[in-house]
Amino acid sequence: MLKNEFHINNINDLEDKNLQSIIGKIKKITVSPDLFPYRIDFDNNKIYFVLMNHKKYKKSFFVLSPGEGPGYLQGVYSISLNLSDVINIFKSNNYLNKSFILYNHGFCCSTLLCRLLEESFSLLSLKEPPALHDLKSFLQNNINDDLNHAIFSLHNRSYKRSQNILWKPSDYAFDLIAETDSKSIPSLYLYSPLREYIASCSKGKRVDWIKNRFIAANPDKIIKYLGPLSENKDLSKTSVQASLYWCYFAKKFNDFSLNGNIVALNSETLLKNPNITYKLGNHFNLKRRFNIFERKNINKLLNTYVKTDAYEFNASDREKMLSEIINSNIDEILEAEKMVGDILDTDMKDFVFEKEID
């Protein structure tokens, strides 16, 4: 858990001797990522920051949010500033965009890809930054260009001039691409094949995860966006929830890709050929550090559960696990594939996006 939380009410009065260790960080807030925004409290006009450094960013390879255990946010204490003060600071700050975004629908090896990119290129990766979740929720009912600019600027700071920034928001923040100017930022949509996604959502606690995600996204909104279903479906079934959620993302991608700077990548392509990491790097004009596939630690990265590094787990293990679930639920999965194929007017056996890297 984060410790030593305190609020600075007047950002223009930074003479408190008790705050000397943090004052320098605040004064460099427009250029240094040492203060990372992890929560926005719109009701109380506060934005919370956690003190980070390059090493802590890298160790926080699961989520950039407070928690216990490996992979969670490694920052040790936080401060809060008035949100209005932060917005005013960034009003006159025109940043040079060095970011690109890795969108995903969950359970598609996005953490693995993020770590491969992080190891291969000069890159600062922001994994599931929670402030983007808060921004997305706020923008559902509000418009504030200055707020957008401030939050995007805070996520566009790096430790080196040559360093790019990778945003890996959770699936929840996917709609940001439509609700902000993020559609102008080079982006990748990583997805898994539909049946693998259904299988992933049918495993243990993930049944509750997809149920909650489906409800949060609003089933009526999803169906309205996708168009009327050819027949009534039981929306309480995991296979139906996962399929419609997957389809919602797929159609969103197709719509965004018409005018946005975004391409897709199938997770199976990544797992079969991790070297595609370099093709992605070239696509996004990233500066290569070295060839990770010639280094000893690549085997550990590809053969360990990447969210915690706690146990062995590789592409073969993943395929075996998902195949068992698919075979046990094949009738439901075939029915779900037909439903999605009808919505997208395509054969799901050979499904690919028009703008897809292979």
Image: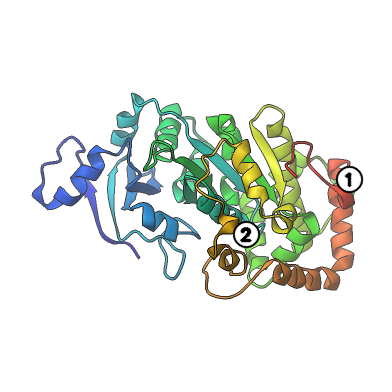
Q: Nearer the viewer, residue 295 or 13?
A: 295
Q: Which mark is residue 19?
A: none
User: Badge 1 is on which residue?
Assistant: 342
Decide: is 315 above or below 6: below
Screen quadrant of the C terminus: top right
* Residue positioned most to the front: 294
The nearer-to-camera label among 2 and 1 is: 1
Is residue 137 visible from the viewing direction of this image? no
Marks 2/1 in contact by CB < 8 Å: the verdict is: no
Give residue 265's position: percent from left, percent from top: 70, 46
Give residue 85's position: percent from left, percent from top: 28, 34
Is residue 19 visible from the viewing direction of this image? yes
Q: Which mark is residue 212?
A: 2
Decide: is 75 above or below 312: above
For image coordinates 81% across by 44% down, the residue present is 352
Q: Earlier in the sequence, mark 2 or mark 1?
A: 2
Mark 1 nearby-residue class (10 Å; few <14, some 14–19, many ≥20): some
Question: In whole angstroms, how far apart are the C-alphas of marks 2 and 1?
Answer: 25 Å
Position of residue 31 in the picture relative to residue 112 (left or right): left
Q: Nearer the viewer, residue 220 or 239?
A: 239
Decide: is 178 above or below 173: above
Q: What amino acid is at disc 2?
A: Asn
For image coordinates 44% across by 71% down, the residue present is 69
